[in-house]
Image (tube, helix red, strand yellow):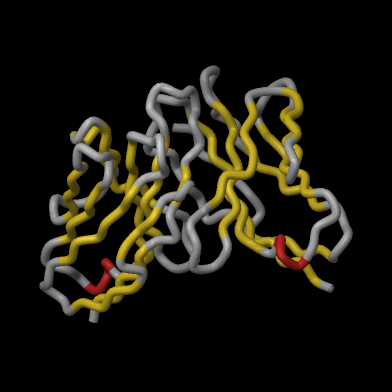
Amino acid sequence: DAGVTQSPTHLIKTRGQQVTLRCSPKSGHDTVSWYQQALGQGPQFIFQYYEEEERQRGNFPDRFSGHQFPNYSSELNVNALLLGDSALYLCASSSDGTDNSPLHFGNGTRLTVT
Amino acid sequence: LAKTTQPISMDSYEGQEVNITCSHNNIATNDYITWYQQFPSQGPRFIIQGYKTKVTNEVASLFIPADRKSSTLSLPRVSLSDTAVYYCLVGEESNYQLIWGAGTKLIIKP
């Protein structure tokens, strides 16, 4: 039973470019959340997708957008990259409707903006 | 959203029991307490979750006093592989954007 998978594992981009990160949730999970984790800090919530719609959003600018597909996989898009966007981007899946279902995380995509 | 306070770092030795305490003075009635473990360059991994009293699973125990304003994660007989960052989170099902602090960096020495 595959857990949460993310691709790519590492990525290097230049300021101003755009990037797309991908996530496949754990089998049986229908909800996907995205987090940004800077070095030495805890994850920061970007947004959550359920039934192909953004359900909740953290304090991130509109440059950060996402999408969820019918098979529950998800993409995170970041436009007009800034140096400060360099971080580990984590995807977590869970099962909606299950009380306090714990999050299952992938190992993240390490994004470096130069 | 309830915030949590944890020690920034802790040291211990192999074979010892380690207790990490988390303060959450503003915990709400519907909030659960959840702990995650994170190794470098990996995503956090769920350890344990509880609402009140004591919860135990194969890797840890979680102690929650009656007022629920704090909780203690207990790791029995730690090994070097338990060196990681441990996060305490408080929230209810509807609070999707849980607040993650910087966690507790636990270093286990031989």
x and y percentages locating residue B3 in the rendered image: 51, 39
Q: Residue furthest right?
A: B15
Along the viewing direction, whichever of A24 and A66 lies nearer the viewer: A24
Q: Residue furthest front?
A: A1
x and y percentages locating residue B96 in the rendered image: 38, 34
Question: Is B64 drawn above or below residue A47 in the view shown?
Answer: above
Residue B53 appears left or right of B90: right
Quarter of the picture holding the N terminus of chain B? top left
Q: Can you tell which quarter of the image residue A57 is in?
A: top left
Residue A73 appears left or right of A27: left
Question: Is B20 drawn above or below residue A29 in the view shown?
Answer: below
Along the viewing direction, whichever of A76 and A61 lies nearer the viewer: A76
Q: Name the residue rendered at 18%, 57% in the picture.
A: A77
Residue A84 appears left or right of A103: left
Q: Name the residue rendered at 19%, 34% in the picture.
A: A53
Q: Name the residue rendered at 27%, 33% in the picture.
A: A50
Q: Can you tell which quarter of the image residue B110 is in?
A: bottom right
Q: Give the mark count.
A: 0
Q: Residue furthest top?
A: B29
Question: Is A68 drawn above or below residue A83 in the view shown?
Answer: above
x and y percentages locating residue A105 in the rendered image: 45, 50
x and y percentages locating residue A35 in the rendered image: 36, 52
Question: Is A91 drawn above or below residue A7 in the view shown?
Answer: above
Along the viewing direction, whichever of B44 and B52 lies nearer the viewer: B44
